[in-house]
Amino acid sequence: MIESNTEKSNFKILRGIIFFLLVVAAFLNQKYLLSGLGSHAKEKTEMKSGLPPSLALTTIALGPLRGLIANALWWRVSEQQEGGNYFEIIQLADWITAMQPDNPRVWTFQAWNMAYNVAYEFPDANSKWKWIYRAYRLLVFEALKYNRGNNEIRKETARIFLDRIGSAVDPGAPEFKKRWAELVVKYIPGGSRAELKLISFAPQNEQSLRKFFELDKILAEAEKLGLNLLDRDTFYSYQKWTDKDKKKLSDMPGYEKSMVIIDSFIRARGLRDELGLDPKRMLYIDVEYGPFDWRLFQAHVVYWAAKGSFREFLDAPAPEQVMIRQAMTSSFLDGKLLFQPEYGVFVTTGNFKIVGKLHDYYEYMMIHGYSKQIDALHKSFLEQAAAILYTFNQIDAAKEVFEHYKEGYANKDLDFETYISESLYKTLHNTTTANNKVLVESSLFQAYNWLATGDIQRATGYANFAKMIWRKHQAKYGDNPARRLPPLEDMMRSAFEKIMASGIAPEFKKRLGESTSIKEFDVSDEKADTGEIMKTEDAYRHRTKDDAIDANPAEYQKDLPNPGE
């Protein structure tokens, strides 16, 4: 054992000597080369187009030794990784990227180390987030700068969203999602396609912007008043402008249209400069794969992972489909955000609209890319879709999904209510309910929870499910009082007390204080607010044609760059 340790120690000393000699040789080589560059140094550095002069000069100066030193540094990285010295690895990786900026593996390794290893070293979500976000910016603003459109880098960026921000196991994931949403809402507050349509065709630069309407004159007049309307803080601080300044500008021709254009320009510029996102590509991805809520992580998984159109995705090799399919499925289950930062409200719910795209995917794969895994995923999707659509009170859509399920996976005698009951039990409650009493109580609890947020459709769906289970149970044990459930109204009162005792926001409790009756869920004839929700039947059939871009997305694909191009 002593001999083994001695050999190991000698080996480390030898490696250290070799590393030192390489550094000395590099220094001498650099000194020699630099002396020969003379007045042509600048010209030589510019030969490496796209690199900062310092990096280009280093690349030239090190010459043939560059690869040897990079290998020695990788050697050192491997040693540090074995010892768990993740912070030391950051500096080593920085040196490697300085010498090999066009090597995607260097960048992806550095980002992976930050987002996973370094972030893991911190106990609190806020500190973890800083390293995860730093990894994102490293890939988007540095790695892709020197490796435009590289698939390996794009895939690693998508993985950060899927595995870190959208993590199902990291206790800090809720905070990660919230922090990302806070960044996005600065530019697209609702995360919707409608907002993307407005900003995706905004002018790309200030020169183009000034050609719109009377914009150049308005900007010039504002500057005389000491207002830089192209500055985000100034533009959105309208309430701080003096009444005289407001009157002066608002009286100018084309003022209202100009303000809309400036608003779109500022938002588009912010997405590009602060988050590295191209609004036109966002819109294209939303039309092809969505719709998504761009404040949530799922949209960004697809943004970075997708190589082309939805049809190209269908024909891609199975391994390339995984992340996109997972993101779309996650969006269906949990891809709509209710975000009210001023009240501390951050609630996610299902994204109905994407169900049509998921259905298209599985229908295509069952014919053209069948496997046992796809078959199992298809079955699970149909079970989940029917159950979740039912809880949102979309009965017709749930029945349509049921017919697809029955056609491929069930006997013809299976009835809709039995199927929904079983699917909901497995999909929504699985191991959280031990018997029908707990199942009814938990469903009523969810009903009040969604009623508190103002989502009447979903609240009604949960309440209807609870009533259905209660009625079926009472009918089954009608002659056995000992096994019957308590009156439904008593169970609703119990659920109400539980939700009021939970940590829901004060304004939600106030809303529920006026909604304690069982009749609150009897709203089948009431017109719910569906301004943000299209008819699920249309979404399921994937026939959205509200405008030209939905009908012909290919028209807007022309000249769209891949991320980082």
Image (cartoon, rainbow, N blue to C red):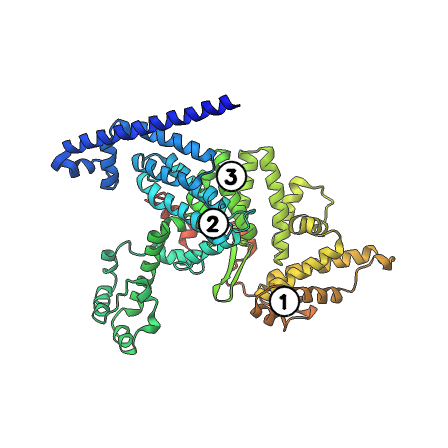
Residue appearing at x 69%, y 41% in the figure: 410
Amino acid type assigned to the residue bearing label 3 in the image: Val
Query: Residue 210 — which label?
Result: none
| Kind of residue at disc 2 | Lys
Q: Secondary structure at mark 2?
A: helix
Q: Position of residue 432 (x, y in %)?
A: 69, 51
Residue 525 has which mark? 1
Q: Earlier in the sequence, mark 3 or mark 1?
A: 3
Res 341 visible: yes
Q: Is residue 535 left or right of residue 436?
A: left
Q: Position of residue 319 (x, y in %)?
A: 50, 34
How busy is the neighbourhood of tag 3: few (under 14 within 10 Å), some, or many (20 plus)?
Answer: few
Q: In the rendered picture of this protein, how many numbered marks are placed on residues?
A: 3
Q: Quadrant of the C terminus?
A: top left
Residue where numbered disc 3 is placed: 322
Q: Quadrant of residue 253?
A: bottom left
Q: Residue furthest right?
A: 479
Q: Position of residue 274 (x, y in %)?
A: 35, 53
| Disc nearest the viewer among 3 and 2 | 2
Q: Nearer the viewer, residue 89 or 328?
A: 89
